[in-house]
Amino acid sequence: MDILNTLRTNKTMQRAIIESALLITFLVILYIETVADMVHLWLNSETYSHGLFIIPLTAVLIFARLNRNPIKNNTSQPLAALGILFFSACWLVSELAQINLLAQLSLMAIIPFVVWTLYGFKALWQLKSALLFLFLAVPAGDFLIPHLQQITAALSIAMIEFFGIPVYSDGLYISIPAGNFLVAEACSGIRFLISSITIAVFYALLYIDSYKRRVVMILSGVLVPILANGMRVFMIIVIAHLGNMEAATGFDHIVYGWVFFSFVMIMLIWLGNALCDQTSSQFNSPVTNQPLTNSPVTNKPRPLAYAVVAVALSIAPFTQYLITQAQPVVGQQSQNAGSAEGANAEKVQSINDLYKIGAGQNSASHWAVYFPTADNIQVAALPSNNKVTAYKVEYVTEGGDKELINFENRLFNPDRWSLKSQRKVPLTINRQTVTVQHTKIVNLGTKQRNILLVYKTGEFTSANQWQIKGHQVINKLLQTDFGGQALIISAEQTEVSEAQLLEYFSQFIQQEQ
């Protein structure tokens, strides 16, 4: 069916588009900061640029569903606004805790309940697939990068060993006689994976009716790019082994990536064509196969439903506005008490610059943390052992990208060090058990370094990020603390044992309490 022709002739569809545009505008105005964060990542991150296409693709899915199976006898259900209230409350908590991902997911979760409230459960159920597809617009996936690096390294090493090439691996470093390789974040394949999942899900929802075949298509969108990325890294290493190290690490390295991405897309499209339903199309009526002229949604929502939706959507943003009005006052008092401003900002910048120290400056064994938005950073060797380096990172307030817990904050430079292991360990301090994050890193010089970390907000100390975020929300609601601290110590494995480092860390935490 011709979409444009339908839009020109179907007045009900025109009304539905106008209503949708007004609702989207209302949502954007109320939740402007969350929407702006998403759009910023769509426009500035190659990993999440697919988000620009999710809304128009969702519109295509909705049109196809309504065209194939019009919704009849729908009725407004104002009680469904309870779902709007619940997820808007989740959004509020996420905003206060500065958990952008959860705030964005909560915003997307509000939309199905808006549809339910205005058009009834039948409409929600009919459009469930398209509304779920909207969640792919959320820029999520950074947390997968370390895991994808590990998987890619494991796959490539397995293939190298299978073909009998001598190989040694330590963490994410892979060494063969021809040279050394690091499975860096750019080699994780996260861009391929997210793009493949988006294409696979869209294709499955638009062209495949069978739930089993949809699952096959979507799982293929997950597994194929992961396997292909492992093979891509393997082939780059093989090229180096065969004697062309420059081709393996130079411009051709990028070309191989695009070639493999194209190969993955072709495979997914071929699989989609094999799985799609040949006898039906989402754009045609299943019975008459003729253009649909009847209204896709027969009943108009009652004015009460519009009012309920407007009120339910507005409560959380208004509450956030009232809470944030108090934050600058507390923040300014803290700044006057001696937090980072002026000269302190230069100090923070200079300490963060240590993270970026270049070659020729003993960079092979150099270690530093990176907290680019911190208000204050203190770094020094412990008085009890100058082989142990201690960091105290302070956030007086949080807002926007300024977060104590953020993917941009780093415990080591991934271009210089490789993650070997990371785990949580209990540490007893004054008869209380504190959860500590123990990270072990390694470099090509075979040096190993242990890093211990905890976060502190108010009187609560832990390395559990979810617990810290929860306490941050409580502290902000009580207006007792609007930021937090990160306490970090580190030493080389050969100079200070893990047990000794834990003892030093216990003393360091007690000193800061």
Image (spheres, rainbow, N blue to C red):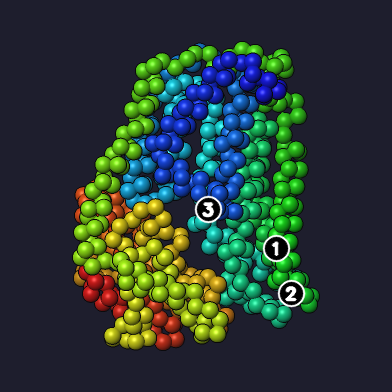
Within-10-Å neighbours for mark 1: few <14, some 14–19, many 20+: few
Q: Secondary structure at mark 1?
A: helix
Residue sitting at 46 percent across and 28 percent down? 23
Seen in the image, is 352 located left or right of residue 295? left
Q: Which residue is mark 1?
A: 254
Q: Secondary structure at mark 2?
A: helix
> In terms of sequence position, does the residue under pointer 1 or pointer 2 come before the other?
2
Q: Which residue is mark 3?
A: 141
- Give, as a three-letter code, the residue at label 1: Ile
Numbered mark located on residue 246 in the image: 2
Residue 349 lies, with reference to residue 499, above or below; the image says above
Within-10-Å neighbours for mark 3: few <14, some 14–19, many 20+: some
Residue 87 lies, with reference to residue 164, above or below; the image says above
Residue sitting at 28 percent across and 61 percent down? 396
Numbered mark located on residue 494 in the image: none
Residue 123 spot, x, y in % from top left: 51, 22
Mark 3 vs mark 2: give the one in front: 2
- Give, as a three-letter code, the residue at label 3: Gly
Within-10-Å neighbours for mark 2: few <14, some 14–19, many 20+: few
Residue sitting at 36 percent across and 82 percent down? 388
Seen in the image, is 221 located left or right of residue 394? right
